[in-house]
Image (cartoon, rainbow, N blue to C red):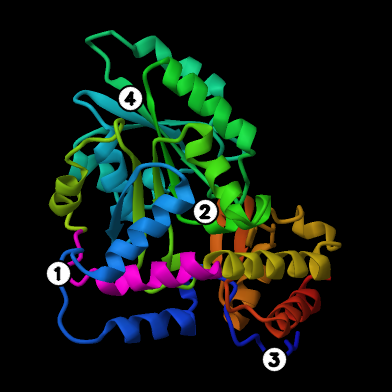
């Protein structure tokens, strides 16, 4: 089988993409002279102010290097002694962080099965029997992911329901938002949507992803004051997530939040995934559903999968089901999508 010319961009991960030119420009502008280190600079102060405006909440804002570090800092700021973290078996903290929360925080992850990678109130009811029993680790924090590791989305009402039940049991709620921009773009595309999905629904801490959404090594932890530990900044330092030259991450967030670029790039990534679905979704063997954000999870016969991966690389997802993941990015072009779809149709259709 002869393949067409491969797309210029891969459909493997939004982490494969480069950095948006406007963020590089923001970094370059910030690279001017000497300023206070460790967050004492004007860029960081402005970025914090913009995040507080976005959240419409008195949040503590801590900038970090990466998503795993953000999750460790956020969880560490919510946990009490003898607490566990309830998450789905699909959760990034459970399967893709090399046990970082367990090793660094010394806690137990209590993973629950979920077909759509979402936690429900029933999951929380099922673990509540341990509360108050001195012989059991205490389910103290619930961690949800938005968008999830299967590309599914919680509705605002679903997040609110989880938060309400969690709080009724005395649990705190963490939202892993590595792709919160994609979720926000999909569910409304504005600051009001973000607020409704997070602190407006009762979330206590957010890991706000930037790297997957066109930034360079820029992440943030948003913590609700009065719920999170007053020593969260110390937890960040102990977790090796305190940037000394913080201005370079902060300058990117200033550009993102002041101009809406974070929504613009995520909206584009989502749209490219939908365009790919429009071009190949009719191929029944792929078993595709319309993407909710910027990822799809088709089924490919092993021999077909290998040939396609050799032509234009993408990741395996669930090898037992012959399932793979296709993911679009802020810089995926319509031409990339058309080329990738042509290769798929040449091999599968």
Q: Determine whether, in the image, residue 157 is placed left or right of residue 242.
A: right
Mark 4 closeness class: few <14, some 14–19, many ≥20 residues within 10 Å: many
Q: Determine whether, in the image, residue 11 is placed left or right of residue 20.
A: right
Precedes in sequence: disc 2 or disc 3 = 3
Residue occupied by mark 3 = 5
Assign the C terminus to one quadrant of the image: bottom right
Residue drawn 63% across the image and 68% down it: 269
Task: Name the mark nearer the viewer: 2 or 4.
Answer: 2
Precedes in sequence: disc 3 or disc 1 = 3
- Foreground pick, 200 / 186: 200
**Separation of disc 4 and disc 3 at Cα?**
52 Å
- Foreground pick, 102 / 157: 157
Residue drawn 46% across the image and 45% down it: 56
Task: Name the mark nearer the viewer: 2 or 3.
Answer: 2
**Separation of disc 3 and disc 1 at Cα?**
48 Å
Q: Tell me where the magenta segment starts and ends, as one range.
A: 242-261
**Separation of disc 1 and disc 4 at Cα?**
35 Å
How far across and down, in percent of the image, does residue 240 sit?
A: 17, 57
Task: Name the mark nearer the viewer: 3 or 1.
Answer: 1
Residue 208, can we see it? no
**Separation of disc 2 and disc 3 at Cα?**
33 Å
Q: Are marks 2 and 4 in contact (CB under 8 Å)?
A: no
Q: Determine whether, in the image, residue 22 is placed left or right of residue 185.
A: left
How far across and down, in percent of the image, does residue 165 sit?
A: 50, 20
Residue occupied by mark 1 = 37
Residue drawn 38% across the image and 43% down it: 94
Image height of 164 relative to 53, above or below? above
């Amino acid at each position: 089988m002869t393949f067409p010319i491969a797309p210029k961009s891969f459909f493997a991960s939004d982490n494969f993409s480069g950095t948006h030119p406007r963020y590089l420009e923001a970094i370059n502008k910030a690279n001017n002279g000497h300023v206070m280190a460790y967050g004492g600079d004007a860029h960081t102060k402005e970025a914090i102010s913009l995040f507080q405006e976005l959240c419409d909440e008195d949040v503590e804002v801590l900038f970090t290097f990466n998503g795993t570090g953000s999750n460790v800092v956020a969880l560490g700021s919510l946990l009490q002694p003898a607490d566990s973290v309830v998450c789905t078996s699909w959760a990034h903290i459970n399967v893709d962080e090399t046990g970082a929360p367990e090793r660094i925080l010394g806690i137990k992850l209590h993973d629950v099965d979920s077909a759509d990678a979402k936690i429900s109130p029933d999951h929380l009811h099922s673990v509540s029997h341990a509360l108050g029993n001195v012989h059991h680790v205490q389910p103290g924090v619930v961690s949800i992911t938005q968008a999830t590791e299967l590309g599914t989305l919680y509705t605002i009402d679903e997040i609110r329901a989880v938060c309400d039940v969690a709080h009724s049991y005395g649990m705190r709620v963490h939202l892993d938002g590595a792709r919160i921009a994609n979720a926000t773009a999909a569910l409304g595309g504005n600051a009001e949507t973000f607020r409704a999905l997070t602190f407006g629904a009762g979330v206590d801490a957010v890991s706000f992803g930037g790297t997957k959404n066109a930034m360079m090594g820029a992440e943030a932890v948003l913590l609700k004051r009065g719920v999170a530990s007053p020593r969260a900044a110390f937890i960040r330092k102990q977790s090796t997530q305190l940037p000394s030259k913080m201005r370079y991450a902060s300058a990117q967030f200033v550009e993102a939040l002041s101009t809406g670029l974070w929504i613009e790039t995520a909206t584009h990534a989502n749209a490219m995934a939908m365009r790919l679905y429009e071009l190949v979704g009719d191929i029944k063997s792929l078993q595709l559903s319309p993407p909710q954000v910027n990822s799809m999870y088709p089924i490919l016969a092993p021999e077909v999968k290998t040939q396609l991966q050799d032509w234009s690389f993408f990741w395996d997802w669930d090898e037992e089901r012959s399932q793979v993941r296709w993911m679009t990015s802020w810089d995926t072009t319509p031409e990339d999508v058309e080329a990738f779809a042509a290769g798929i149709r040449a091999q599968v259709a």
